[in-house]
Amino acid sequence: MPRPPTILTPNPPKKPKPRDPVASGERDAAVNRLAGHNYFLLDKFEAGLALRGTEVKSIREGKANLRDAYGLVKDGEAFLLNLHIGPYSHGSYTNHDAVRTRKLLLHGEEIRKLLGKVQQKGLTLIPTRLYFRKGRVKCELAVAKGKQTWDKRETEKRREDDRSARAAIAASKRRNT
């Protein structure tokens, strides 16, 4: 007796798993908020970082801290010092050092520009954020000049004045409608 034909039902399509917003580049991996408070940010550059595998995975987990980091140009190469990247949770003996000197990947012309700017008195390189672009970790560097205490107070006062002006405009719009 012949077998009855088997009816194949198509499997329902699987929903794509949502990608991590840090890894996809939708959100920054780390931001140095104090940089804007403590420094005048004059010029910004984008640089790649020479990292180890466990460092990239730790950055994806959000374990990077830019607070004490700064850049240095030496012998025609650029480096990032004091960038803290915590150990990878699933790492083993191959885990990286949390604070080590990391090389910045820049073109020669960009390094010469940075060297010219940093050699001016009072200017330094400060990393402002870490993010992913096309699967690679990028660092936004700013040429910065340190703020004095009175500069910080002046900036805060200006910000407060702008906030109160916006609130007054919004309040007058609400009254008129």
Image: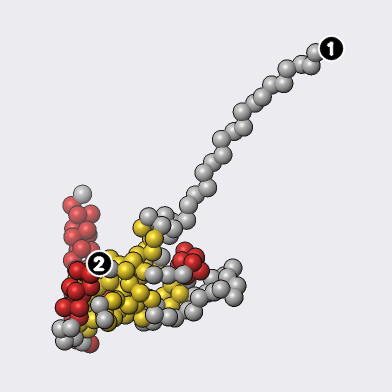
Q: CA distance from mark 1 to mark 2?
A: 76 Å
Q: For the point 25% across and 77% down, which residue is it? A: 76
Residue 161 falls left or right of residue 66 = left
Residue 51 percent location from the top left of the image: 42, 70
Marking on residue 1:
1
Which of the two residues, 151 or 173, is positioned nearer the viewer here?
151
Marking on residue 107:
2
Residue lying at the far right in this picture: please name it: 1
Which quadrant would the N terminus be assigned to in this image? top right
Residue 108 falls left or right of residue 99 = left
Q: Quadrant of residue 129?
A: bottom left
Q: For the point 49% across and 79% down, which residue is it? A: 97
The relative height of residue 150 versus residue 160 in the rendered view (above or below) is: below
Which of the two residues, 139 or 104, is positioned nearer the viewer here?
104
Q: Quadrant of residue 84?
A: bottom left
At label 1, the amino acid type is Met
